Amino acid sequence: MEENLQSEVVDLRGECCPIPEMTASKKLRKMTPGQTLELLTDHQPAVEVTLPALAKSLGYPISVQNEGDAYRVRITKR
Amino acid sequence: MVAEHSFPQRRIVAPIVLVLFALGWYRFSDVYIRTDDASLIAHGNYAVYVPLQQVAAYMQAVTWVSYAAVFGGLIMLWSGLVAYVEYKERSSHE
Amino acid sequence: MAPPMILDPLFNDGLTFVYLVFALSGFILGWVAQRGNYCFVNAMTSIFTTKTYDRFGGLMLLFGLSALVPGLLVAFGMVPAVDQYYFNYFGGWYIVVGAFIFGFGAAIAGGCNLSMLYRAASGYVQNWLELAGMMVGTYFFATLVWPVQLSTMQVGLLSTKAGGYVEYLPYDLFHTVSAASVGATALILGVPFIIFGIYLQRRTYAKFKVMKSTDPVPAAGAGGIVVNRGHQSSKPRSLSVRAWRMLTLKEPLGTNLATVVLFLDLLLVFVMGAGYTFNYLVITSSDGGRFLEYILMPFGVNLALNTPWYNSSLPIVDTSVLMVIMLIVGAFSASYLSGDFKVRIPRDRRRLGIGFGGGILVGLGVRIALGCNVGLMWTNFAQLGYDGLLFLASMLAGVALAVKVQERLL
């Protein structure tokens, strides 16, 4: 159970639309509720538009953290 | 963490690239586009040939646009240099 | 009696001024598209990937406004009808085929003809390669496809044999280009798109609201976007604070704000360029493809002299060239000043090849269709034609296929 709740980290730096949201969507489908998907991206549209839209559409909480050269986006599956 | 610790060189290099791009486009228009248009009429290709008056207007507009882009680039370069000096001052205090 | 086919300039400002207006509009286009994350192909992929319709709704609003307002300007006699329909080009099988190839290529390469350019200017290496691929695709089109396509256009095989008023919906529907017919067509074409756009956006926001009441998801702004930079506060900001943050480039432009500014940009060239030139927004489909011609010139190769399409299409000294150049400058400036500019190389190096391959399809598709998502699809709504509708449907199909293919590849 403990292992199931570990978060998965995906490095998407350099990638642009529609890869970040598509990857997130696919990964989230395979995850179990309670797990968190962490996406590392430097694509602003993904941070500002597509990933929040995906999270809101699925009803999952999302947080975005600016880490200088990239953003860490966390989406927790419900 | 992916935060960067050194000053990003792109803040200095990128405006220089913009200035060179604008100058390059001006030179290219002046040297090649004019010549190309002249060679079109020499070969009797009226489909894509444009009258000299239009070429002159284009060149005038390119001149203004290039000025604007070069000055814009220099302003950005200046702001980049200011940021660099600030960064250096900060890091020398630490 | 056939409607006139002689351009009727609205102003006498001179060609230099017109060129400068197009340059300014290109700058605005690049800046606003970059700050608003405006991407036609992404508005379409989001229907399938995130199941949200707000940005596609924004696109519908853009098309609706672009059909309605220029149409009404013509109907009220402020712009001559001939300046609206003069540059309507042929319609036929090639729009359906080309838009499908284009939609597929753009969705796998990661950029439509607008986003490819502004992202290339923001440092996305994948989009640089897409642009290079597009030049190659244009050359393939010019030498392999264009001669055949041209012959079908000449004989009218699944194609109209002329452009201009023949492609003008008021003439097609009412057999006249009178004020009443143009006004009625503008309403018939524009209003449903505006209503449809608003409906799609409301539907998406309502869905977000339902989700919000059950989950602590950050609240949506006008564009449905909230970013917490380094902290978890999700308190919505006031309008004046948001406006200030947008002006100081700390916050992106919302979808609808970007839509309205882009529409006004189209209106600027529609009015100021009327009677002088192609008075709509055009982007890379011809000029981006033409960069190959420019690159080869210093090596003494002149495609305009001996290569099909290059020797018979748009002149090289065109307003659109300046528009493209300034689009790059505008997008770069917005990207640099907002701190977003960075040379980005995808971690997965395969994506560089996919970008280049997608670019070839983009180049091929847009040339077969005789225009891109801006210079043909969006523009054609403002021209009150029907090619834009064909392009839209076909591009959507291409994008849908690309999403399916990419989901398997990921």
Image: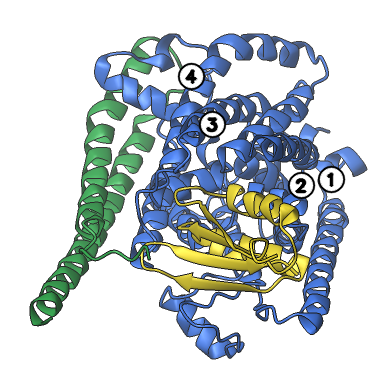
Indicate left or right for C360 with C145 as reference.
Answer: left
Q: Is residue A33 above or below residue C12?
A: below
Q: Which residue is mark 1?
A: C170
Q: Which residue is mark 2?
A: C384
Secondary element type, mark 3: helix
Q: Which chain is yellow?
A: A
> Closer to us: mark 2 or mark 4?
4
Secondary element type, mark 4: loop
Q: Which chain is blue?
A: C
Secondary element type, mark 1: helix
Q: Which mark is residue C310?
A: 4
Residue extending furthest toward the right: C174
**Badge 2 or badge 1: first in the primary sequence:** 1
Marks 2/3: CA distance?
Answer: 36 Å
Display colour for chain B: green
Indicate left or right for C256 with C311 as reference.
Answer: right
- Location of residue B54 (image quadrant): top left
Along the line of sight, the residue nearer the viewer: A35 or C250: A35
Could you tell me if residue C181 is visible in this image? yes
Picture coordinates of residue B87 (x, y %)? 17, 73
**Badge 4 or badge 1: first in the primary sequence:** 1
> Closer to us: mark 4 or mark 3?
3
Q: At label 4, which amino acid type do we have?
A: Tyr
> Closer to us: mark 4 or mark 1?
4
Q: Residue at x 55, y 34 (%)?
A: C285
Q: At label 2, which amino acid type do we have?
A: Leu
- Location of residue C173 (image quadrant): top right
Marks 2/4: CA distance?
Answer: 28 Å
- The chain carrying label 2 is C
Q: Which residue is mark 3?
A: C354
**Badge 2 or badge 3: first in the primary sequence:** 3
